[in-house]
Image: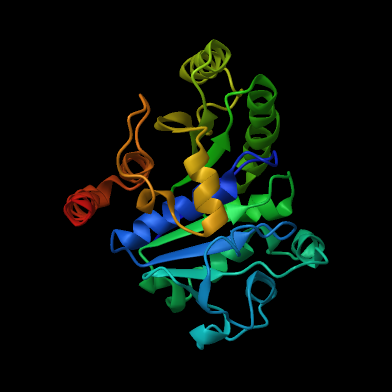
């Protein structure tokens, strides 16, 4: 089981869309995948893909320990995509934030609950999050098995918010090291990249700050890197969101200079899950034959 949170302390960066696209690609590549909608305020990931079956419980019951995990149908919803299950977000009154803030194990609640045998059957678990700095983002970050993906647009205010918000949270979680809990490494995914010089300049500045370790005074304990894969600002991602389809199914070839969506998601999956590259290769070959 490999748990990867998709995070940002700023709303509108595209976390839910890319969490769903990544989960959809992994599932189509044959990995048993679970998408957890951790955005308790605006549960977008819960509604991107249609459901074959919607469980009566969701994130609220999962974190409040009010559902029996020995009965998967109580908590696990099934999407129309084979191999892709979902835990919906169902906290419209935002009670979870207060409950987790005051619970003695609040920040560890998701990390601990994912140790239940129910979740060991999943090869990949993708956790979406709210674009805000809160205890909910902290508990999602700490659920990572190794790394988290921070979605950032190549816009200077968004980059500044990443350093102020996301890096700030990582620094606040460092004292947990005395309990043997390390903060995950963070891999930045540039979303909505374009062809303009300003975006390239912003990306170059971000790369310099990271490569020179200027993002924190605690670079020994906080590890941040920039993914090679970039998501370009393309209508295909909006279309996929609108019609409830992962983008790799919608665009396998293009005349643009940027990669087609299918190749982009393949490269992202390979970067995040290099241990399954052979499976992704086989999937891409099979998909290409099916199209031709």
Residue 227 at what x, y percent from top left? 42, 32
Residue 259 at what x, y percent from top left? 35, 32
Residue 194 at what x, y percent from top left? 51, 24
Decide if residue 169 is on the left or right side of residue 190: right
Quadrant (top left, top right, bottom left, bottom right) of the N terminus: bottom left
Residue at image position (50%, 44%) is 237
Decide if residue 133 is on the left or right side of residue 199: right
The total number of labels drawn is 0
Residue at image position (23%, 50%) is 284
Which color scheme does this rendered protein use? Answer: rainbow
Decide if residue 273 is on the left or right side of residue 282: right
Residue at image position (58%, 46%) is 15
Q: Is residue 25 above or below residue 60?
A: above
Q: Is residue 120 above or below residue 286?
A: below
- From where the camera sits, is residue 145 visible? no
- From where the camera sits, is residue 45 visible? yes
Q: Nearer the viewer, residue 124 or 29?
A: 29
| Quarter assignment of residue 97 | bottom right
Q: Nearer the viewer, residue 178 or 141?
A: 141
Q: Nearer the viewer, residue 286 or 216?
A: 286
Q: Is residue 112 above or below residue 286?
A: below
């Amino acid at each position: 089981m490999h748990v990867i949170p998709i995070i940002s302390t700023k709303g509108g960066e595209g976390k839910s869309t890319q969490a769903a696209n990544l989960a959809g690609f992994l599932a189509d590549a044959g990995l048993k995948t679970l998408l957890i909608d951790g955005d308790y305020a605006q549960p977008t990931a819960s509604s991107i893909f249609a459901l074959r079956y919607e469980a009566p419980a969701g994130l609220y019951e999962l974190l409040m320990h009010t559902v029996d995990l020995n009965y998967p149908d109580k908590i696990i919803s099934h999407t129309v995509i084979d191999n892709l299950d979902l835990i919906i977000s169902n906290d419209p009154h935002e009670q979870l934030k207060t409950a987790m803030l005051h619970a003695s194990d609040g920040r560890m609640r998701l990390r601990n609950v994912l140790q239940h045998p129910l979740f060991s059957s999943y090869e990949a678990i993708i956790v979406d999050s709210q674009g805000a700095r809160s205890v909910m983002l902290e508990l999602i970050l700490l659920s990572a098995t190794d790394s988290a993906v921070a979605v950032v647009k190549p816009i200077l205010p968004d980059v500044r918010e990443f350093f102020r918000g996301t890096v700030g949270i990582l620094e606040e979680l460092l004292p947990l090291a005395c309990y043997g809990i390390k903060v995950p490494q963070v891999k930045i995914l540039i979303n909505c990249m374009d062809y303009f010089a300003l975006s390239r300049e912003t990306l170059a500045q971000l790369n310099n700050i990271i490569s020179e370790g200027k993002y924190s005074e605690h670079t020994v304990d906080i590890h941040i890197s920039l993914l090679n894969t970039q998501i370009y600002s393309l209508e295909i991602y909006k279309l996929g969101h609108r019609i409830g389809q992962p983008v790799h199914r919608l665009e396998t070839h293009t005349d643009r200079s940027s990669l087609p969506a299918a190749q982009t998601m393949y490269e992202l999956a390979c970067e995040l899950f290099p241990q399954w590259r052979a499976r992704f290769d086989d999937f891409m070959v099979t998909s290409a034959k099916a199209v031709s």
